[in-house]
């Protein structure tokens, strides 16, 4: 009797699980999506992969988590939490963490070659052939990719201007003394 | 619920908010003298943005003369209010100037040099506000540039344009922060105008009841307001307990109604709207006299001043001017220290050129004795005093740990953003920890992180959109290339078909015709040349002709010469023929192959084929003395395409051969005469000749003919030889 009951239950749950596997199937790799969420999306390629998503895939496949200079320590920490690995310092081979920058085209020097437009991974440069180009600052991720292709070197990477909105309270001003 | 609350209020029984502190008030410093007017500053620094929200667009230019009350910016956005010229004068400059903000980051500022004439623009007071629609009044208030004057600086018209049912309109005259007495003095001196402003507000908002809250440490103000409000039962004056921060919006709502504003919500969500008494005064000014917000009452106080007092300061007045007018005692401070706002929530200014803005209610210049610099920060001893003091019911100690460790998600889980930054926790902290600084830092970091997250999401979206676009463009290009290739191939095929069936005039036919004409001309020239050579040749062959029939029993020498010439000619003809055949065949093969690939290649191949055909023809022509019709016919079709070129070449060859035959003929008849009986079998006896000529029937005939001729010549030669041998024997 018990044998029959167990068998029936096993079949029942098997069928249920089988149905659930089909019905609630997750498309794609959710881990890659999660990692991609944490990356800064500058699409700069400093990690050695052509964009943030490919690096996310690489991390999911076991690559190091410390190859993203724009994300810096904060991103490494989050990735370490997500992946359940030890946070390591940023890999210096891929660059150092820097202040946030945006590209700026010196407009009177621009010859309108469109090379930077083709290089920009987020379409943040507007302009046309033989017309002056300019950067949409709000869309620029500061990836640096437009600087090299410019034949007249008229693109600078300028630090993001500090405003009241992005100002951080200076905790350094508070005198912190070691109490021994 | 509403009636219950009202009953309690009438009885004077209020609720409590959790925590709170009772710091020394220090209000007596400044609340005993009337609000004064100071002489105008030399320059007014008017920041474009003086409130929460966005700044308007500057509508004046450098060098313009402006009148008092003239708008300097246009509000472009519902969240922006205009600023106005506080006095008449000239705009000296529009540039970056240190801002009235804890950061001191420079911001766009208009610099006005007053001319002292105080010339007003035409003021348009509203005569009968009760007859006007609400929207018009709200618009008036907006264009008067009124932003909340309690400290937050929220544009007043936005609070007024809510369409919800309002239970309570609360007028905040609590002024709980130590030192500050500007609202106190305003209520004492201008209670009636405040009442007028409240009338306008309640006309717009139609609340069920209006509560005017005044802390019980301001009995004079309460008395003055009581007189002003006594006639209307819809107004209730509430003397609330003196406890910091009772003047906080959420805390005051809790004290008066017992209701709590939901986290991340607004008072309007629970049917309450709150305005500061200063705002009510400004609204009355705007509606009844048409004056925009140009000046405000500022408490200039502190023990480092000889005459702490409340003053009317035009917006844009630099702090330095106000301090100097109130008698700054430099000896009381080691270094100049000016605090904007009160001691609890204010911030130390970076420069004394910071202008007064719509939200500035106090300039505090404390002596070093009065307000010593904060002592060293000691470690948290987990005493819990901060949690007891927190008016928002938060856990300041935990927030401090998480903020310090930058564990912002945990800090947010503990409702960091419900912190009103009142400073009560830091006030009670025995370890001198500047807790609010940590929270502000954490909040700023979290906001920046959120902004970055939004930006990252946008960047990702744009990146993916770009990739998708590039991919699409690539596919489109490939598709287009494939289509055009197919179209070209089809056209090519059609072209070949139509040219097989002759006479379809097309563009390239015309070109071909032109080419053919050119060639014909050339050929004609060549013919002239060849005519000449032929004449020479006929001249040379004629004697032979003449002599051979002449003496039929000619000498062996002569006949031998004739046969030698015939042999040589036959050989030459054969050679030329074979070379032309050889050169022709690969050319046509190439042409055919290329035609399958693509039209351009086909065209090139055709050109090559034509060139080869032409060469072959030329060699033939030179070797075989082609005549006029042959070249013309041969050239014309050669211009068209490889197949035609082949045909043409074949025809040319045939003609050449005929010509050769004709040439050989003079010699052949001689042999025919001699060996007429061997004529037929000879042709059959030369199978290799016919095997060599596989191409066309014409060609075959020609070849057969040539072969016959050769064979005959050969036989004649052999016979001659045997004859010679016999003779020799």
Image (cartoon, rainbow, N blue to C red):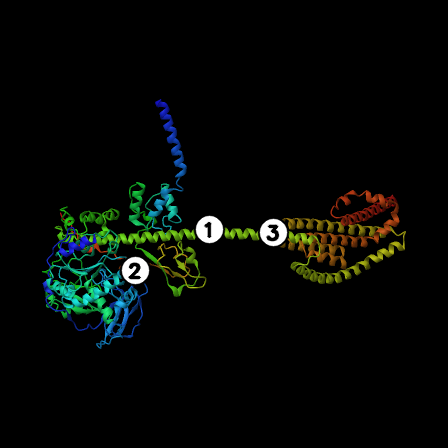
Q: Which residue is mark 1?
A: B471
Q: Which mark is residue B489?
A: 3
Report the chain holding disc 1.
Answer: B
Question: Of the residues tagged 1 and 2, which is closer to the observer?
Answer: 1
Report the chain holding disc 3.
Answer: B
Q: Is residue B557 left or right of residue B254?
A: right
Q: Please state the horizontal and vertical placement of residue B473, each as a whole percent of the image.
A: 48, 53
Q: Which quadrant holds the N terminus of chain A? A: top left
Report if residue B474 is visible in the image. yes
Alpha carbon separation for disc pair 3 and 2: 60 Å
Alpha carbon separation for disc pair 3 and 1: 27 Å
Q: Nearer the viewer, residue B208 or B75?
A: B208
Q: Which residue is mark 2?
A: A161
**Label 2 Cα neighbours within 10 Å, binned few <14 / some 14-19 / many ≥20:** few
Q: Is residue B289 left or right of residue B507?
A: left
Q: Secondary structure at mark 2?
A: loop
| Residue beneath the point at 86% across and 49% down | B672
| Residue beneath the point at 69% across and 50% down | B584
Q: Secondary structure at mark 3?
A: helix
Q: Please state the horizontal and vertical placement of residue B120, each as a whole percent of the image.
A: 24, 75
**Label 3 Cα neighbours within 10 Å, binned few <14 / some 14-19 / many ≥20:** some
Q: Secondary structure at mark 1?
A: helix
């Amino acid at each position: 009797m018990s044998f029959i009951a167990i068998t029936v239950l096993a079949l029942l749950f098997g069928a249920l699980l089988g149905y659930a596997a089909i019905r609630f199937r997750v498309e794609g790799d959710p881990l890659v999506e999660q990692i991609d969420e944490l990356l800064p999306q500058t699409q700069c390629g400093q990690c050695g992969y052509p964009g943030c998503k490919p690096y996310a895939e690489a991390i999911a496949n076991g690559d190091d988590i410390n190859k993203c200079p724009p994300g810096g320590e904060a991103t490494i920490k989050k990735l370490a939490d997500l992946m359940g690995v030890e946070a390591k310092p940023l890999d210096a081979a891929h660059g150092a963490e820097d202040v946030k920058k945006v590209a700026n085209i010196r407009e009177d020097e621009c010859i309108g070659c469109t090379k930077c437009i083709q290089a920009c991974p987020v379409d943040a440069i507007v302009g046309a052939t033989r017309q002056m180009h300019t950067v949409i600052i709000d869309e620029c991720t500061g990836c640096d990719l437009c600087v090299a292709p410019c034949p007249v070197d008229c693109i600078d990477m300028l630090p993001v201007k500090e405003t009241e909105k992005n100002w951080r309270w200076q905790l350094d001003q508070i005198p912190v003394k070691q109490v021994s | 619920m509403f009636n219950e609350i009202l009953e309690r209020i009438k009885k004077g029984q209020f609720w409590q908010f959790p925590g709170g502190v009772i710091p020394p008030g220090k209000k007596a410093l400044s609340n005993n003298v009337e609000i004064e007017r100071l002489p105008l500053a030399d320059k007014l620094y008017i920041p474009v943005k003086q409130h929460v929200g966005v700044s308007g667009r500057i509508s004046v230019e450098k060098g313009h003369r402006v009148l008092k009350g003239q708008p300097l910016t246009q509000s472009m956005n519902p969240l922006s209010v205009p600023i106005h010229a506080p006095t008449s004068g000239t705009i000296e400059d529009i540039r970056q100037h240190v801002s009235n903000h804890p950061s001191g980051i420079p911001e766009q500022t208009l610099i006005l040099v007053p001319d002292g004439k105080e010339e007003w623009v035409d003021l348009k007071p509203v005569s009968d506000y009760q007859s006007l629609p609400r929207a018009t009044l709200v618009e008036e208030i907006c264009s008067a540039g009124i932003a909340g004057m309690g400290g937050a600086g929220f544009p007043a018209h936005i609070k007024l344009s809510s369409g919800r049912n309002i239970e309570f309109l609360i007028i905040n005259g609590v002024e709980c922060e130590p030192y500050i007495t500007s609202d106190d003095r305003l209520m004492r001196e201008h209670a009636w105008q405040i009442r007028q402003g409240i009338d306008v507000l309640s006309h717009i908002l139609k609340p069920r009841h209006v509560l005017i809250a005044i802390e019980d440490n301001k009995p004079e103000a309460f008395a003055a307001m009581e007189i002003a409000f006594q006639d209307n039962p819809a107004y209730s004056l509430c003397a609330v307990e003196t406890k910091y921060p009772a003047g906080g919006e959420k805390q005051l709502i809790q004290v008066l109604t017992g209701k709590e504003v939901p986290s991340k919500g607004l008072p309007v969500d629970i049917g309450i709207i709150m305005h500061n008494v200063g705002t009510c005064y400004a609204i009355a000014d705007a509606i009844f006299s048409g004056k925009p917000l140009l000046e405000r009452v500022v408490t200039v106080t502190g023990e480092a001043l000889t005459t702490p007092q409340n003053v009317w300061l035009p917006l844009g007045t630099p702090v330095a001017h106000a301090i100097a007018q109130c008698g700054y005692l430099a000896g009381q401070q080691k270094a100049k220290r000016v605090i904007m706002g009160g001691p609890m929530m204010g911030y130390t200014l970076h420069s004394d050129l910071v202008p007064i803005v719509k939200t500035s209610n106090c300039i505090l210049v404390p002596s070093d004795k009065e307000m010593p610099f904060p002592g060293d920060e000691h470690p948290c001893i987990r005493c819990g005093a901060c949690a007891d003091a927190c008016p928002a019911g938060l856990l300041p100690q935990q927030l401090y740990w998480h903020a310090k460790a930058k564990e912002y998600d945990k800090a947010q889980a503990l409702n960091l953003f419900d912190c009103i930054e009142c400073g009560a926790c830091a006030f009670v902290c025995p370890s001198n920890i500047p807790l609010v600084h940590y929270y502000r830092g954490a909040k700023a970091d979290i906001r920046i992180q959120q902004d970055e997250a939004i930006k990252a999401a946008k960047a990702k979206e744009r990146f993916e959109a770009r990739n998708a676009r590039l991919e699409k463009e690539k596919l489109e290009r490939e598709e287009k290339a494939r289509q055009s290739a197919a179209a070209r191939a089809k056209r090519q095929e059609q072209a070949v078909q139509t040219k097989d069936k002759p006479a379809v005039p097309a563009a390239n036919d015309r070109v071909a015709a032109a080419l053919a004409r050119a060639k014909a001309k050339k050929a004609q020239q060549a013919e002239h040349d060849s005519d000449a050579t032929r004449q020479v040749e006929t001249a040379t062959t004629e004697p032979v002709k003449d002599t051979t029939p002449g003496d039929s029993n000619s000498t062996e020498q002569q006949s031998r010469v004739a046969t030698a010439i015939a042999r040589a000619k036959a050989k030459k003809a054969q050679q030329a023929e074979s070379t032309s055949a050889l050169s022709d065949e690969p050319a046509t093969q190439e042409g055919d192959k290329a035609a399958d690939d693509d039209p351009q290649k086909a065209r090139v191949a055709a050109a090559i084929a034509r060139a080869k055909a032409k060469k072959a023809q030329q060699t033939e022509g030179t070797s075989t003395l082609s005549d006029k019709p042959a070249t013309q016919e041969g050239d014309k079709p050669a211009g068209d395409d490889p197949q035609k070129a082949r045909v043409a070449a074949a025809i040319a060859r045939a003609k050449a051969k005929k010509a050769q035959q004709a040439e050989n003929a003079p010699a052949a008849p001689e042999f025919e005469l001699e060996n007429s009986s061997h004529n037929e079998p000879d042709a059959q006896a030369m199978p290799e000749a016919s095997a060599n000529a596989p191409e066309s029937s014409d060609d075959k005939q020609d070849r057969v003919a040539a072969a016959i001729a050769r064979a005959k010549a050969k036989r004649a030669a052999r016979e001659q030889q045997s004859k010679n041998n016999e003779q020799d024997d």
